Amino acid sequence: MDCIPESLRTLWPYTPCWHQTDAGRMHYVDLGPRDARPVLLVHGNPSWGFLWRNLAAELVARGRRVIIPDHVGMGLSDRPGRIIRLADRIRHLRELCDKLNLQDIDLGVHDWGGAIGLGLASEQPQRFGRLLVTNTAAFPSNNIPFRIRLCRLPVIGRFLVEHLDGFAWPATWMASSDGLPASVRAGFLAPYATAARRHAVADFVADIPLEKDHPTYATLQKVSEQLPQLSQHSILLLWGARDFCFTPHFHDIFQKIWLHAQSCVFESAGHYVLEDAGEKGLKKAADFLTA
């Protein structure tokens, strides 16, 4: 918690928990009554568990148990000395769920947390219940903005992301259509204050598989092929239509895979849909997960 300034403790006041992985410690928080039905909330890049703080508070107030992990290398988790691939992240999440003996899990995912969380859910569909899917993808796509392609370049991209903070910092204004309050911007950026702490942010970008010979392409393709196994689950696609990255095009692909999924699109919201959609978005997500 050393990277969280005292000024942000009111926004993130939670006691840290730790899960040891083969790449270092994974930080997570475990909130609410331990005997309640669990909700697992999975972030993407370059955010961390802070992304889910408002939804978590609402769910706990409604009596639910909420588990929010930070992927290894991200948020408050350890910084490993090697790149962590999608297959590793799915396995780390599965191992955390096994450690906590989680069953009947309701799941929320965002950004590349979609490929991770839905990757696990599609492996073990009987273990999961409701699926809240927000501005994400879990299938190969070349529909990637130029600015993200630029950050994937082996030398230039890593320099931009790590040393010039060209990914985490821009996300605090590009990912929100309305703009984030200063305290919230600081919260998103707190774990990524130095180049060393942004190393996994660059790794996450580099792990986006655009080419078929990419080390992670086969893993993402397998996740994509398994998504129809989740079609009988209750699913809500909650989307910010003004997302520059995960545009409504991605929402529509999910709708074609899951014909019975509910859809709620906030036309004025951006990538951080739960920030921009305010109380309406928060209520929609919480009502769905506690129905």
Image (tube, helix red, strand yellow):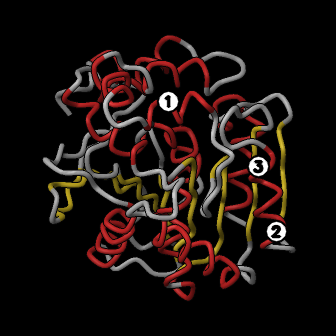
**Mark 3 sits on what residue?**
284
Image quadrant of residue 239? top right
- Where's the N terminus, which quadrant? top left
The image quarter containing residue 33 is bottom left
User: Spatial distance from mark 2 to mark 3, Cα to Cα?
Assistant: 14 Å
Nearer to us of marks 3 and 1 is: 1
Which sits earlier in the primary sequence, circle 1 or circle 2? 1
> How far across and down, in percent of the image, does residue 286 sit?
67, 53
Crowding near the residue tagged with mark 2, few <14, some 14–19, many ≥20 C-alpha atoms within 10 Å: some
Q: Which residue is mark 1?
A: 150
Q: Amino acid at mark 1?
A: Leu
Residue at position x 31%, y 30% in the image: 155
Compared with 180, 47 (above or below) is below
Dot 1, how many residues are within 10 Å of its Cα: few (below 14), some (14-19), or many (20+)? some
Image point 68% across, 43% down: which residue? 246
Residue 261 - label? 2
The x, y position of residue 143, in whole percent, is 69, 46
Q: Secondary structure at mark 2?
A: loop
Q: Secondary structure at mark 3?
A: helix
Camera-side mark, 2 or 3: 2
Mark drawn on residue 232: none
